Image (spheres, rainbow, N blue to C red):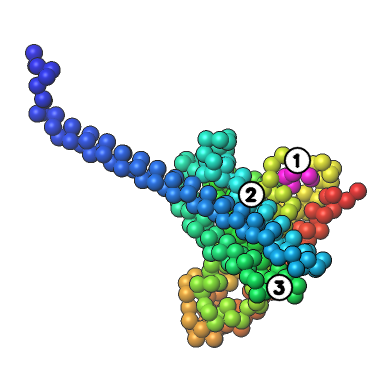
């Protein structure tokens, strides 16, 4: 009989492998904890920055008290306030803000690594936008009277809104989205998410494609319709739940035809963005490469610069029209 207190040398390789696996698991666990803590820290910082800027709005000098100035300040502050609230709700639901105090709906810890990385990047990206907003609010030289300060502040709110909507959409389960892609009647949130993702993809491809091409597009090009689309989604309540959600508003209105119209418009938005994506070159090209079209090649990447910019500009105009249609349809829901 073997002595249980004598180390069994025959199992040394197996024991060594177990030690490696335990060490690796421990290291991975530590890395996950670091990622979670970093994301929690970034979420808190972004919310604290929003709160500080909102407080600074209230500290603007009393000499700026004309009706027009108050209106511009109110619009900018109201937009930032709404996004700060959305950020707080999202942070609580993912366990990244006030952890342990609220029910977690989409646990950040259980999200795929790519999604965690994307969330962290978005939280970092929001810092620059909030810094720009803070500078605008603190600037004692620029008056709200001309409206320029309000316009610039509004642009920063639009950028922040897009970032926070990306955060909200990122926590949706990927398999759930894929399961609904072929659904004959997908929910409005899923359609909205698909369009928002397509907007981001097209915007990135334009930025990295060709400077010569981007210069030929209208000022703001795809970013303008994208901001309008995201703002529509926020105001319509696409991402909300319960009585404030767009789906519930449609049911309560009794206007089922409006839902069909909204679905059709969202599908058209997705189709238009897909058409733009097909027009764009697969990789970065120089301006010279886009100056002439190859008559012997039907590839979209070989379209001439003029043809390509014209095609994209036409789609951009179409997207703006779809945004107006979406606003009109959701306004119809609340009309008696």
Residue found 74% across the figure and 47% down from its top: 246
Q: Of tags 3 and 1, which is closer to the observer?
A: 3
Q: Residue 45, position in %: x, y?
A: 52, 53
Counting residues from the N terminus, which is met first, the one under dot 2 or under dot 1?
2
Q: Residue 156, position in %: x, y?
A: 63, 65
> Please, what secondary structure does the residue beneath circle 2 have?
helix
Residue found 52% across the figure and 78% down from its top: 210
The answer to whether residue 115 is magenta is no
Q: Name the residue under label 1.
A: 243
Q: Is the magenta stretch mostly helix, strand or loop?
A: helix
Residue 28: in sight, yes or no?
Answer: yes
Counting residues from the N terminus, which is met first, the one under dot 2 or under dot 3?
2
Q: Judge from the rendering whether residue 17 lies leftward or rightward of residue 216; answer left or right.
A: left
The quarter of the picture where residue 213 lies is: bottom right
Q: Mark 3 points at which residue?
A: 143
Residue found 60% across the figure and 50% down from its top: 87
Q: Judge from the rendering whether residue 23 lies leftward or rightward of residue 281; answer left or right.
A: left
For the residue pair 119 and 43, the one nearer the viewer reads as: 43
What number is the disc on residue 86?
2
* Residue numbers of the magenta segment: 243-250
Q: Of tags 2 and 3, which is closer to the observer?
A: 3
296 versus 193 height, above or below: below
- Crowding at mark 1 (Cα within 10 Å: few <14, some 14-19, many 20+): few
For the residue pair 253 and 184, the one nearer the viewer reads as: 253
């Amino acid at each position: 009989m073997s002595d249980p207190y004598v180390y069994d040398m025959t199992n040394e390789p197996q024991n060594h492998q177990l030690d490696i696996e335990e060490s690796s698991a421990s290291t991975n666990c530590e890395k996950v904890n670091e990622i979670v803590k970093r994301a929690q820290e970034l979420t808190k910082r972004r919310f604290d920055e929003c709160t500080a800027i909102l407080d600074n709005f209230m500290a603007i000098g009393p000499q700026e008290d004309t009706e027009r100035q108050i209106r511009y300040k109110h619009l900018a502050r109201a937009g930032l306030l709404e996004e700060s609230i959305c950020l707080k709700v999202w942070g609580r639901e993912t366990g990244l803000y006030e952890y342990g105090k609220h029910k977690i709906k989409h646990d950040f810890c259980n999200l795929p690594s790519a999604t965690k990385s994307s969330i962290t990047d978005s939280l970092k990206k929001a810092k620059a936008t909030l810094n720009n907003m803070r500078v605008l609010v603190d600037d004692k030289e620029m008056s709200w009277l001309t409206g320029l300060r309000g316009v610039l502040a509004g642009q920063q709110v639009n950028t922040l809104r897009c970032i926070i909507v990306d955060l909200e959409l990122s926590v949706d389960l990927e398999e759930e989205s894929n399961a609904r892609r072929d659904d004959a009647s997908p929910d409005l949130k899923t359609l909205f998410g698909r369009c928002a993702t397509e907007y981001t993809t097209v915007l990135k491809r334009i930025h990295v494609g060709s400077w010569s091409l981007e210069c030929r597009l209208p000022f703001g090009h795809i970013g303008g319709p994208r901001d309008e689309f995201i703002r529509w989604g926020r105001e319509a309540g696409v991402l909300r739940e319960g009585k404030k959600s767009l789906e519930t508003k449609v049911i309560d209105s009794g206007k089922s035809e409006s839902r069909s119209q909204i679905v059709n418009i969202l599908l058209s938005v997705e189709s238009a963005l897909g058409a733009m994506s097909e027009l764009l070159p697969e990789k970065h090209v120089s301006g010279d490469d886009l100056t002439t079209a190859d008559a012997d090649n039907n590839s979209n990447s070989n379209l001439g610069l003029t043809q390509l910019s014209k095609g994209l500009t036409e789609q951009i105009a179409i997207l703006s029209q779809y945004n107006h249609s979406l606003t009109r349809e959701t306004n119809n829901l609340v009309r008696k």
